[in-house]
Amino acid sequence: MQAVAPTQSLPTPAGRRTVGEMGERLLVIGGDGAGMSAASLARRRRPDLEIVALEMGRWTSYSACGIPYLVGGALDGIADLVARSPEEFRSMRIDVRTEHEVVGLDLSSRKAEVYNRAHGRTFHLGFDLLHIATGARPRRPDIPGLDLPHVHGVQTLADATRLLDDARSHRPGHVVVVGSGYVGLELAEAFLDRGASVTVVEASAEVMGSLDPDMGSLVARSMRQAGVTVRTGEELTAVTESAVVTSAGEFPADLVVLGLGVEPNADLAAAAGVDTGVRGSIVVDRQQRTSSEGVWAAGDCCQSYNIVSGRPVHLPLGTVANKQGRVAGINISGGYATFPGVAGTAVTRICRTEIGRTGLREQEARDAGFGVSAVRIEATTTAAYMPDAQHTTVKLIAERGGGRLLGAQIVGGRGSAKRVDVIATALAAGMNVEDLIGLDLGYAPPYSSVWDPVQVAARQLLPQL
Amino acid sequence: MQAVAPTQSLPTPAGRRTVGEMGERLLVIGGDGAGMSAASLARRRRPDLEIVALEMGRWTSYSACGIPYLVGGALDGIADLVARSPEEFRSMRIDVRTEHEVVGLDLSSRKAEVYNRAHGRTFHLGFDLLHIATGARPRRPDIPGLDLPHVHGVQTLADATRLLDDARSHRPGHVVVVGSGYVGLELAEAFLDRGASVTVVEASAEVMGSLDPDMGSLVARSMRQAGVTVRTGEELTAVTESAVVTSAGEFPADLVVLGLGVEPNADLAAAAGVDTGVRGSIVVDRQQRTSSEGVWAAGDCCQSYNIVSGRPVHLPLGTVANKQGRVAGINISGGYATFPGVAGTAVTRICRTEIGRTGLREQEARDAGFGVSAVRIEATTTAAYMPDAQHTTVKLIAERGGGRLLGAQIVGGRGSAKRVDVIATALAAGMNVEDLIGLDLGYAPPYSSVWDPVQVAARQLLPQL
């Protein structure tokens, strides 16, 4: 790869050139979904725009969510996870430069300071329009030993490469996952599939804090049944070369996975004077515009808006990143689109158990000021008489009185997880429990009972409102 | 079972007694979902009510939709399909009388003429409140031979018993299904599983008329791949002892299944003066009240309202029947509930292919006066890189201009069918294509791409509106 010369045509100090002028340059910082969705949309809608995308790592537009399946052995290699390579973007006339890290931003002079990692050189690059999609990084609390080489945060494909190398070269017998978010628990299962003895350490009383504890306990049960040691209510105090130390004791660990969530990579933007909000994430409006004119942001580095609570949140998920990137790309190129906010939908599979959640948890709803009615029901995802009928547990949360839907959690067998999509859609529409009962959902014995499980829950909740 | 004496306390000719009076009697005609849902709700809400339910057949509250799985051998026996037996209802103080057929109704004197099939006796039974849930019967056009004993309409468990007996005793080598609705095609597969040679004869150019032809052809392809002979554009002209004769020729048939749809059993109600509408089905309002005071109706005998077209329709499906029965039961017992209408959602599995549909077909939308934009896309139901990724085809139909969603059809591998539920929910909310793109749907590699297939379709449709 060639080193890039500083830009020739910088805008006047007064600001960027007007939209529509020939020769305008869009700079995209970050080559994953939020960045490249925007770049692709902008490319399609404004053929005249010069688009440069800088990516710190070696890959673009990849599925970080696929890393556990790579580690577990279901996929052949890292290439499987790349949706679109730098070469493909270049053929679309998007000038992607990998291993390029932006180390400084001057928004008034419209210049980025860029470090070319491959050549060890720093240069300046001018821009007219700027899109920040710098993502997030695994949270690493200030605990002794977290910088040891066998401790892995898992966020990028570079992380995945290191993790896979470590797993292959050292064949760890004891793997400890610290924290119990989605990726952590998915990796716990992946290492189980690799034959390791796996322990999950969680400081809270129950795993998977995105669920209410009564639903999280169902996930913990599945994990224990599959052979994972689950230690809840234990605070991590240190990691050593060969062990993990918690408030409850010490136990062997050849490889440690950090599953403590992520924090936004927003330092660059914040240092440049862009407003930040929840957990330091970049504040954006519905068009993904930051507080600085001509500067957009999208994805894990950004703040979102929760459509149920009406509150700003930081929700670093791939779906959100891609949607926000699309919206930014349309607006950057002179169109109009808005990101409506998040319902907080997430699905996953842990140890053969399907998990789906959307909206607010019970406590979260109370904290947001709602009077809450909740119900938990057992059902099957097919007609109960089908030979392969699978159990499922649905928790439905609604506002007392009017019955506005606030959230749902589903844990169970095949066909459970994606059922939250109906609730996510109902949340977007502001539906209530009675509306949910009236929905014309699909029924056939292999796929549902005549009342879908989410409606069984709604029927039970209605008289309790 | 004892013969039932005529009622002692008939209401005055002026009309029924007022709601709330002790000793009132609710008569329910029909012991399946639409009838017994209403009876159960009424029982729970009005302990004082005397409830008599008359059922022509021997079973109550059964899943007719499960019959193909019974015939295919996945279920042990008919008992599997019974959700609640007459005995269970009796223990709830609902006086269920099976093998009792209502042969006449006098709404002014509030009396039913009832034929006890087991004892061959007729008697009169008075009522104050009446709920009609007489269901539907397979359509039998006036074609020679359709009354032969090896020709089976499949609607009730009695039909299922006859069909199973025939299949077991004669082990038919050649089975012909006439028509290609859900139950017909499901039975085609069931007989394939029993080792028969199976032919489907359909008069239209493509199978499964509830789909657009371009989507129906995908179903036909799956059926042919599984070994079913699919003959479209052939009109049935006669059935003989050993063959089916169509406009295109004659071919062997030891057993014939009628899959030509059903027509409402509304003659009894119509003869009593209750208004009927589409295809002769009973007209009801949003509370499931018929045109006659103190008379409710629900289920396959009833008319419904399509929430997309705003038109009355006859949609004989189990989900609709159960929902309408619930609404009727609440209103009968002095409460208030409404049935919001149908989106026309249906799902099924034919020869390992999943099928889902909701809303209006493309032509149906045009017929209803909509300007239509439609798109058909290919996607996978999981992340494309997962080893078990399944293909799916999504067709999305929206109104030109504003982009109001009008319908969707999905045909594909595992995880396809129930995705229509999101569209069904969106239809109920009156969402448009842009709303669908913005929905926060669940994503994890085993369950979806980062853009759910329905959103991939929406994104492609948006610029074409």
Image (spheres, coloured by chain):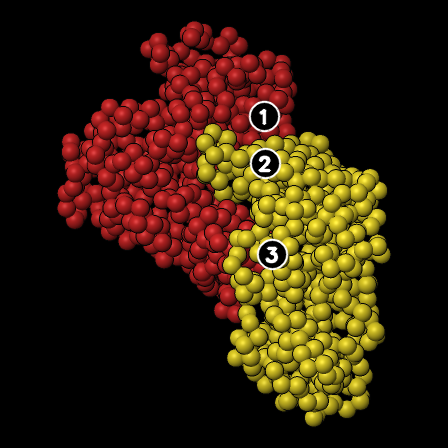
Chain colours: A yellow, B red
Q: In front: mark 3 or mark 2?
A: 3
Residue at screen point 58% across, 51% down: A72
* Location of the C terminus of chain A (image quadrant): top right
Instruction: Tell me whether marks 2 and 1 sit on the same chain.
Output: no
Q: Mark 2 falls on what kind of element?
A: strand
Chain letter of the residue beneath label 2 in the structure image = A
Tell me the residue that label 2 is attached to: A392
Rendered location of residue B408, percent (x, y): 47, 54
Q: In front: mark 1 or mark 3?
A: 3
Tell me the residue that label 1 is attached to: B41
Instruction: Tell me whether marks 1 and 3 sit on the same chain.
Output: no
Image position of B42 with respect to B226: above or below? above
Q: Which of the pair A297/A22 is nearer the observer?
A: A297
Q: Mark 3 falls on what kind of element?
A: helix
Image position of A383 with respect to B390: above or below? above
Tell me the residue that label 3 is attached to: A168
Q: In front: mark 2 or mark 1?
A: 2
Q: Is residue B336 in view? A: no
Q: Horizontal placement of B100 versus B247: left or right?
A: right
Image position of B323 with respect to A348: above or below? above
Q: Horizontal placement of B29 versus A121: left or right?
A: left
